[in-house]
Image: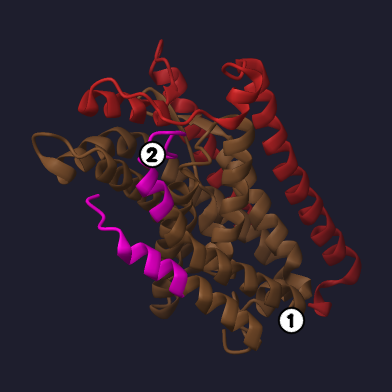
Amino acid sequence: MCKNKVTAFILTALILLIALVPLFALKGAEFGGSDDAGSQIVESIQGNYEPWFTPVLETLIGGELPGEIESLFFCVQTGIGVGIIAYSFGYLAARKKYKGDNQV
Amino acid sequence: MKNWTKPEKTVYFAVLTFSVFLGLTEDVSAMHIMEGYLPLVHCILWGVICLPFAAHGFITLKHISIEKPQTMILLAMSGAFIFVISSLKIPSVTGSCSHMTGTGLSAILFGVSSASVLGIIVLIFQAVLLAHGGLTTLGANTFSMAIAGPILAFLIYRLGQKRNINRKITVFFAAALGDIFTYCITSLQLALAYPSNEGGIIFSAGKFLGVFAPTQIPLAVMEGLITVLVVMGMENFALPELRALGFVGKEEL
């Protein structure tokens, strides 16, 4: 159990490290999406490529999704996920605590 | 599939036949692929390839929910895991951002086709609300993120189990390589649609991979680590459910 805690701690530290190091190491980098980098290559291979279908939402609102709203939707997505995971782990942890280990 | 009912088998094989038939009639000369960036024929073909997986996954999940209802909490968690993981754009060493796929966890817990169903839900959410990926490219993206990646993750996990390798290590490699593999397939899909004039499909695939791979490798390592963390948490708190899924043996722990 104690060994597990140490492992978990090390893993968390590593994860944060991987996520944050590029931000500080590459000062001034743009950090654009690599999905967009994909469309740039398409252009370099194909010349001027015009996507033949625009996202439904962009058609509905008649333009690109504003950045702030996009981050709102991303947050909603994260929020839904985190909510479910947190609820489940909470439920499972409480069950273990109040039932005792020998039940499982 | 052994204990599927007759109508379920019929539906599945009908979809499978339809898919194989449609897939064979067109000669294919051919991280998320952007909306409108694949030719219509490719969109349809990738979609058709995905149909049997989706049907299989749907029926599998229905069975799990009836036979092992206690494991539904783990299903919800693995689905939510994909939601969280694929919504986070992480900066990478190349100075651009990408995100992880998160489908490895559900693949090793519930099998490939179940992971496909969960992946499709997330991809639809992102395609409709976020203009990320797309509805026309849904089939192609499903194939790379929710079928190919999970297949590799599942195979690696099984291999590690057979060889009796430490489970944490197996889970790490399964999730990390599944993530990388997703982007390899994406590159190939784009290359099939945009073969380069000089070197053809392979040259083109190398070019796409050259953009995706360096960005994705650190993120894949990260996805591996996070998946190990979640599995550790589940082992700690949800042993009975993991046992019901056959993820941990009866004698273990």
Amino acid at the residue labelled 1: Glu
Subunit ID for the residue under disc 2: B
B56 or A37, nearer to the observer:
B56
Residue at point 40%, 29% (across, down): A34
Q: Provide residue B157's location: percent of width, then percent of height.
A: 45, 68
Subunit ID for the residue under disc 1: B
Amino acid at the residue labelled 2: Gln
Residue at the spot of label 1: B67
Which chain can be seen in red?
A
Q: Provide residue A35's location: percent of width, then percent of height.
A: 41, 31
Q: Earlier in the sequence, mark 1 or mark 2?
A: 1
Give the mark toward the camera: 1 or 2: 1
Residue at the spot of label 2: B216
Residue at point 46%, 43% (across, down): B137
A21 or B79, nearer to the observer:
B79
Q: Secondary structure at mark 2?
A: helix
In the image, residue B19 above or below residue B9 = above
Q: Provide residue B195's location: percent of width, then percent of height.
A: 20, 40
Left or right: A45 as drawn, with respect to B56: left
What is the drawing colour of chain B? brown
Residue at point 23%, 22% (across, down): A47
In the image, residue B97 above or below residue A85 = above
Residues shaded magenta? B17-45
Left or right: B185 as drawn, with respect to B64: left
